[in-house]
Image: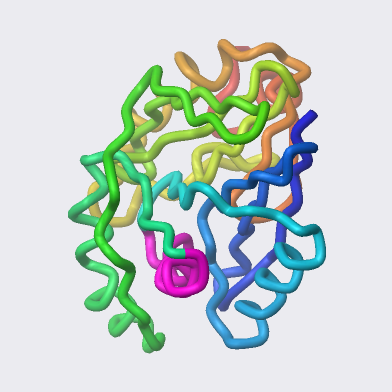
Amino acid sequence: MTTVRYFTFGPFSENTYVLHDETGECVIIDPGCYSSAEQQALKKYVEEEKLKPVELLNTHCHVDHVSGNAFVHDTWKLLPVIHKEDLKVLESQERVSAMYGLNCDPSPLPKKFIDEGDVISFGKSKLKVLFTPGHAPGHVVFYSEADKFVINGDVLFSGSIGRTDLPYGDFDTLEKSIKTKMYTLPEETVVYCGHGPETTIGDEKYSNPFVNIN
């Protein structure tokens, strides 16, 4: 069984995820640790749980989701794994951080690109990659069929959806991603969001005010 642990980090209150199972292997998803204290909180959890990080995954590359990529790389020698369409977003990290008045520790470039249907394996766990653009051009989510959850970045929120007014955002594309990729998952699937609390596919499918099937 996969354990999901999250931390809320940074000036944008972004959720950083550590997923691990009984083998001790783990993946770190969207490290948003911005301050030294946040970096140490992430490191402390990994060390106290005696985990072995084996992958650094980004659902997408907006600055709040990649601000800790460099720290994860420096600490555990992991390079990010992203969708190729978000490379241009990653490469804009320093410029966008400056626009927000934020310090920036530039992310290393990705180790490899992932796409729809790929499977990320760690320990005894597997995450299926679904391509879900709209909030960002190369946005992906990570779906655990066995444990009935999805790490969904900024696609869906509890009662809301990801912004589409940022560069490369598009509402029609996001709506299609939600209806064809997210809402086709089992309704009991827990949705772990990039900001705010978790929700379920069923709750959002029928009551989300922005995209629902009613």
Q: How many marks?
A: 0
Classify residue 2 as left or right of residue 112.
Answer: right
The dominant secondary structure in magenta is helix
* Residue 208 at x, y percent in the picture: 65, 31
Is 185 or 202 nearer to us in this picture?
A: 185
Q: Residue at 25%, 55% (x, y): give it.
A: 167
Q: Within the image, what quadrant is residue 82 found in? A: top left
Q: Residue at 44%, 74% (x, y): give it.
A: 74
Decide whether residue 63 is among the magenta residues: yes
Is 160 or 97 nearer to us in this picture?
A: 97
Is 65 or 54 nearer to us in this picture?
A: 54
Classify residue 98 as left or right of residue 19.
Answer: left
* Residue 79 at x, y percent in the picture: 36, 57
In the rendered structure, which segment of residues is drawn in magenta?
62-76
* Residue 59 at x, y percent in the picture: 45, 44
Is 161 or 103 nearer to us in this picture?
A: 103
Q: Residue at 29%, 66% (x, y): give it.
A: 108
Picture layout, residue 13 above or below residue 16 = below
Picture layout, residue 142 above or below residue 192 = above
Classify residue 194 as left or right of residue 170.
Answer: right
Picture layout, residue 56 above or below residue 203 = below
Q: Within the image, what quadrant is residue 77 found in? A: bottom left
Query: In which quadrant is the C terminus drawn?
Result: top right
Q: Residue at 63%, 58% (x, y): give it.
A: 15
Query: In which quadrant is the N terminus drawn?
Result: top right
* Residue 75 at x, y percent in the picture: 51, 72
Decide whether residue 66 is among the magenta residues: yes
